[in-house]
Image (spheres, rainbow, N blue to C red):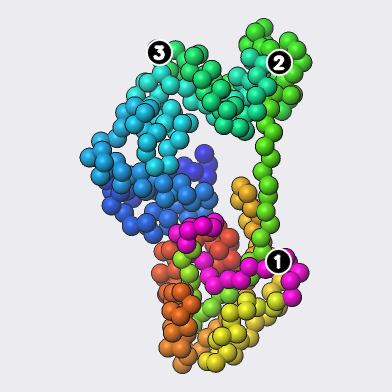
Amino acid sequence: MAQGLPYFENFLENFPNVEDLANAHEETVMRLWQGLGYYSRARNLHNCAKDIRDIHRGVFPDNYQSLIQLKGVGSYTAAAIASFAFDEPVAVVDGNVFRVLARYFGIATDIAGNSGKKEFEALANTLIPKARPAEFNQAIMEFGALQCVPKNPDCSHCPMKSGCFSFKNDLVDSLPVKIKKLKIKERYFRYAFIISDHEVVVRRRGEGDIWQGLYDFPMDELSGQNENQDYPGFLGEMGEFMTISVPEPKKWYKHILTHQRIFANFVSVTVPKENRTALQAWTERNGFQLVSLEKLEQLGKPRLILKFLEDQK
């Protein structure tokens, strides 16, 4: 909440209604989201606003079945909106609800699998009352967050203990069951921070990898931190119009994503003003862009890039 609230307020200030968000440029949306991570959610939010503008004629859907058709809206989000905003009796199932239901009813189905998710959603929807569904959803989520916590819950003072299967059978620490484990991939980037007369070479990241739509710098991906490469190989092409003077990169920046750990370091390259035209041609030939430092500030960038730029001040 502490991290997200300022972003929420900033979004409301810039986009007072759905149409304003739908009409915004993607770069503006990504810049306002910058630093939050999960950037696909920003793109989905933007596309969702466009769908509401174009398909629903600016009227926000008021029921679960319509909500779940929106870009980026899954069963959890659709149920939350439907119950909290429109009092539809549809159950919200998040990690807290999985835990409460698994322990109370003694369910050993893997919550990481699709069949498990469907089983728990079906059970939750049999429990939710038609009257005050929002209050029920809020209550069960809060109960999991405050009382039926993941580790060392205070079961002796739990008001639900008399009917709890896990408490009566000493299975509190065994439920819920989550078999799938995330495979964490480590990646190593070496960036080139190329600056010339208050302009910087950047690239807009495309589809098929992390940080889609955000801006970073030209980069080579290494096989490991110890790979013997003092500077990115593509800088060799620039030798025709400049002298590359790069100190040995030592500082590694670490950024943790859900499925990846990114390690990156940076080399700084200064191109003389008289070689500005050659640099411009080189950037265009390689699919990069040359932007002013002021423009760089306005572009959406990964947190890792922000950390590096902050260190340059």
Residue where numbered disc 2 is placed:
166
| Residue drawn at the location 43% of the way across and 27% of the way down | 79
Q: Amino acid at mark 2?
A: Ser
Q: CA distance from mark 3 to mark 2?
A: 28 Å
Mark before the other along the chain sequence, 3 or 1: 3
Mark before the other along the chain sequence, 2 or 1: 2
Magenta-span inclusion, residue 233: no
Image quadrant in which you'd find residue 117: top right
The vertical placement of 128 against 70, above or below, is: above
Residue where numbered disc 1 is placed:
223
Labelled pair 3, 2 in contact (Cβ < 8 Å): no
Q: CA distance from mark 2 to mark 1?
A: 47 Å
Q: Amino acid at mark 3?
A: Lys
Residue numbers of the magenta segment: 206-228
18 left or right, relative to 100: left
Of tags 3 and 1, which is closer to the observer?
1
Q: Amino acid at mark 1?
A: Ser
Magenta-span inclusion, residue 217: yes
Residue where numbered disc 3 is placed:
130
| Residue drawn at the location 51% of the way across and 79% of the way down | 195
Q: Position of residue 247 (x, y in %)?
A: 68, 80
Labelled pair 2, 1 in contact (Cβ < 8 Å): no
Q: Position of residue 295 (x, y in %)?
A: 41, 69
